Amino acid sequence: MADAEGRPKVAKLVACLVAMAVLVACVLFLVADGRDGTVRGLDAGTTPTPPDTVAAIEAVGPLPSHAPSPVEREAARAPVDAAGSSSWRGELAGLTGRVIESEGTPVAGVRVALLELDVSHLFDGSSIDADEPRLELEETVTDGDGRFLLGGARGPTFHGLGIDLGGPRATLRVIDHALPHRERTDIGDVVLAPYGVLTGRVVDESGAPVAGARVRFGPFPAEILQASPQEFRSDSLISVGAIAMGGGEPTVIELPNWIRASIDRFPVPTTQSAADGTFRLEGVALAQVVGGIDKRGYVGVALGPLDVSGGDHDLGSVVLARGRTIRGVVEDGYGEPASGVEVYAGAELFPGIAAILQPCGPTDGEGRFELTGVAETGQIVAVSRRARHEPWSSTVTARPDNVLIEIEAIVQLTVNVRDELGEPLPGARVQLTPGRRPGANRYFGAALMVLPKPASPARVFSEVEPGSYVNASLGAGLYDITARVLGLAPAYLQVECFASVNEVTLVCSTGRRIELTAIDAVTKSPVVGASASVLRVGSTGFTKIALQSTDQDGRAVLGPLPESDPGAGLEGFLPAETMVLVQHPRYSDHSVSPNTTPLIVELQAGGTLAGRVHWGGAIPTCVYMLTLTYNGADGFLEDFHFPRFSVTDLAGEFQITALAPGQYSVELSERFLHQDPLGFGEDFEVSTVHREEIEIQNGETTELIIDLTPTGRGATARVVGRVRLNGRNLEGAEVSVRGNESVRVVTDSSGRFETPPFAVRGSAHVSIEGDVTLAEGPARRMQLHAESLELEHGDVHEIDLDLYPLTLRVQVVEAASGEPVPEAEVSANAENQEDSRFQDETRTSATGEATLLILKPGQYSLEAKAAGFGKASSQVNVPAQGLSEPTSIRMPRSVPCAGRVQFDPSAGAALGQGFAYLRVHGEDNDNEAGTVLNAPDYEFTLDGLAEGEYRGWIYLGGQGGEEVSFALGPNGDRNLVLFCIPSED
């Protein structure tokens, strides 16, 4: 069973897989989260400087109707109109810039794509045939001077530049300039980082070359390799296991098409192996990098970390193995083979948590499927469905051969569509999507709600008589049904279709129409061509249920719409809420409740924020980034207001226009978004030097003057002090201050230290580490001090440490015989909350002895772990003079614990299928253990448990069972039988 602390970790794990498809969102999160600190990678005292040419943010001429020299692209990536209306094209923003190498050389002939992430992308409009979102608006190629020109950007949204996407120089740059509508903004130079070259040769297990293998590397943390990112492709699926979901069957995450289209064009340096298997990947960061090599039909290889800081690295021959082959059959509930069924399969990355699934193709006439190139470890997960609008059927098994997927039987569904008087309605459009119900784990429930569900084609149902629509070949399952009739409100119903013949009736009512009029707030004249949409959040997810443009009179009629939430009565992670969103490039976005009457929307051109940054009156010598966050939205749209950005010019001035009236938070920080976001590692931080609240008025300019003092960093403080150990000055102790900026200094020969002035805003954390020498052993690195501080401008905080560490001798012995336990892991942790950061750990010697260091007297918890023993602990109170005698920890021998899990077959066939897991925890001891249970015997062996009383939790078929209990005697138990009774919770 996944415990409460483990669930966020599980969520992060699967979120890592999803993040492979939405890398841009990671950057957005970084900005919106307001992280503080200093940009890593800069030498001490280094100040970010503007590029050679910093362009003024102003119009340089009328915006052309299209970008020059667009690249010919396939239909899936054809340029689209960002506003959904061709009349907006001349109203939107354009941008120009130059791509250069780090030494200033222009980069000619490189592809540059304009990326846009808008709030509307999150709302599924497939039910009203709205255009599918696209991350890429447009792509062009730089000219001989490295210059590019792009257009069609909507200013208030989130923008980026994709450089050479899917190629060896692939990288991403977030646009931190303001992009005013009807103007062309010069964003200056886009500087590509210096790069290294990876070379090598891809071969199979026989040494033959493998052509067409994909090679990708980037400066990611090494932990990402645990998620096997090299196996993730545009047609892959993600299976979220029973433990991650908190019970139930595995859930399949199917990314929407607009994300899938970007998977193979990730901003990560990419190339392919040639006919002889060789490859040369230019564009790799001069840093520690990780990556992988993969090809369909082979097991991908994860590689790294590799040190490419020297420029070139040869990987030699990289072997792609064929791995396991999954072979199986899909059958219906009667044992009949299911032919032409879509199948995906793969191996679990982590038991019960996640798997990446690859397409196996449709089953043959005998229902068989096959997939090669599967990893040698992990249980097999396989899923199937007859059509995209049907639910997945899944299985989890330990063996790759004879995999059986039992697909739901074919049933008949009749949908009767009636009006409010019960009269049949012919010509209705009836659609299906797989139904969803919230699982026990809300982390993934929330994530799944954002993803659109695959809808059925228009002709899945046949109208057998007026108002009656039949699908006689539908896979059994839970469905959301929608019926639409021209002139009436759509009808929705969630229904379980498990009987051989199912019949439901949907009533399309007259509903209600939302008639709105969009006018200019100042002139009161109608606004033509505004986009009005109805957005709904509720148990059925994020949906766009109506979309219309205003006419010559500024009017739009939305609907007819149903009177109630289509998911009414279903539990959801968000309360049901509906909003009308009105957008036009000449005005700020406006949201309003659909219940407002009369619905006259006064669109405001918005206000302007203009100002200047100075250093005590002097012009700054660096460029700053301004982040403006709107605080005035009501309802769920408050979470979807993207921050607005701008950068200061050479005079320190900035300006952002078309801001919706209301309250805003302003943050000024060191510029960082112009860097490659792949370099934003786990320890990446950015210094926010100023923050305040402002109010924007419609039609007015709000002036903001920011004085960062002559230091250029705003309020600063220092930390000084001395460290003494056992009456002697401690040289070489490391003092770290982490807050708005991070600084690090070491103590000198007199034990003194003094940090340079660092920017302060809020709290700062100080820690001191140093080497503590034992009389009978080598020095140990320990944390000597830690505290959080609230500092003001000009403060000098002094720390005077005069420590006399105490040694705590420990003797670890076997509980029964008193014999010493060598190589036991022993740790000491302070129980006082203020001192909880202080701990020490070591291993026992051959005589079972160990010496621990503690910094001051107090109550400590000692713990010992060793192979073949149960965990043991002890509490000890250490006085100021220390303890003269060693503290004894008596470890019980572990005893055998093995057996099997049984369940009552009458509890349901599903209980004996899918993932199974057992976890136990001691009642009178601290021992715990867990294991995966494999069908059909569900046998288990648990190690590291000592004699005592235990509680256990069983998951079978993804369903949690009632708590079980058992006792282990002195000889343990090798034939333990635990009964799983499904929990009613």
Image (tube, rainbow, N blue to C red):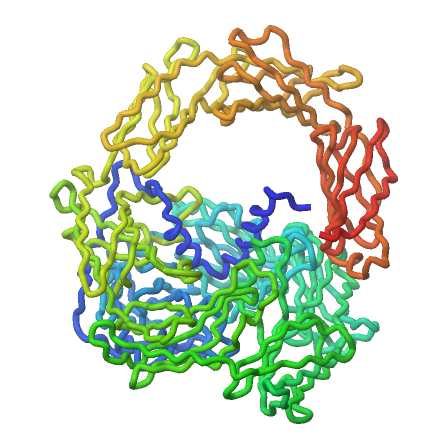
Residue at point 27%, 77% (across, down): 519
Residue at point 13%, 46% (across, down): 619
Q: Residue furthest left?
A: 617
Residue at point 48%, 75% (across, down): 545
Between 87 and 233, the one nearer to me in the picture? 87
Residue 258 in sight here: yes
Q: Residue furthest bottom?
A: 465
Q: Is residue 774 above or below residue 48?
A: above
Residue 274 in sight here: no
The percent coordinates of residue 511 (x first, y second) are: 51, 80
Residue at point 16%, 42% (across, down): 615
Direction from residue 568 to residue 835 in the image, left or right: left
Direction from residue 318 to residue 99 in the image, left or right: left
The percent coordinates of residue 331 (x first, y second) are: 78, 71
The percent coordinates of residue 778 (x first, y second) are: 52, 17
Q: Is residue 80 above or below residue 195?
A: below
Q: Quadrant of residue 869?
A: top right
Between 75 and 107, the one nearer to me in the picture? 75
The percent coordinates of residue 350 (x first, y second) are: 64, 50
Q: Is residue 615 above or below residue 367?
A: above
